[in-house]
Image (spheres, helix red, strand yellow):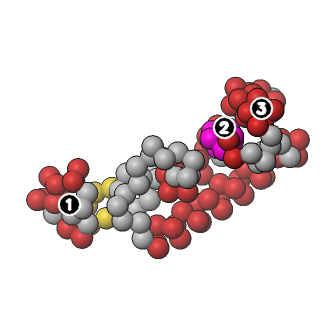
Amino acid sequence: IMPREKICSSATMKRRKCHMQHGIQDESCVQEELLEKKCFAETLCVKEAIEFYHQPMRKVRVELFPIFPQLDSAVSHGKDADVKASCNTLVESFAFPEQILPDVIQKSDRDYCRKVVHKLAKCLHCVLGTELRDELP
């Protein structure tokens, strides 16, 4: 087992450097903070991280949402298709505008992602010691 101070040391160093340059309250470091959180999540809360960062929010019936041009072939066959956006795409879109959100975000997507975020936050809270938790935004 790797010591806590070694886990995600590169991401932590980048975040600390950004905070030293811009201050801890400055919004200039949001991407560094989120990338550090992702590293800790994928290392310490694997199941929750997969659900937040990699699992699509939902399956949609293609006939109901023909606005996704990449799904044209599925439409003609009447198949279900994944909306490729994961919860992190929805929740962190303010910090990563290059991520493309689906054209349709439903209330059920937001409700689902809220639950996923809470599970990930609870896991990170439980596994991170106070010395690391105090440093994270």
- Compare marks 3 and 2 and give the one earlier in the sequence: 3
Q: Does residue 130 appear to the left or right of 47 in the view shown? A: right
| Residue at image location 58% in from the left, 60% down from the top | 116
Q: CA distance from mark 1 to mark 2?
A: 39 Å
Residue extending farthest to the right is 131
Q: Secondary structure at mark 3?
A: helix
Relative height, residue 21 to residue 112 (above, below): above
Q: Main secondary structure of the magenta part?
A: helix
| Residue 31, magenta (yes or no) | yes
Q: Does residue 85 appear to the left or right of 129 in the view shown? A: left
| Residue at image location 20% in from the left, 67% down from the top | 63
Where residue 69 sits, quadrant-wise, is: bottom left
- Residues in magenta? 29-36
Give, as a three-letter code, the residue at label 1: Lys
Q: Report if residue 41 is visible in the image.
A: no
Relative height, residue 48 to residue 9 (above, below): below
Percent across and percent down for residue 121 are 69, 56
Relative height, residue 83 to residue 31 (above, below): below
Percent across and percent down for residue 108 are 46, 72
Callout 2: 10 Å neighbours few (<14), some, many (20+)? many
Percent across and percent down for residue 35 are 63, 39
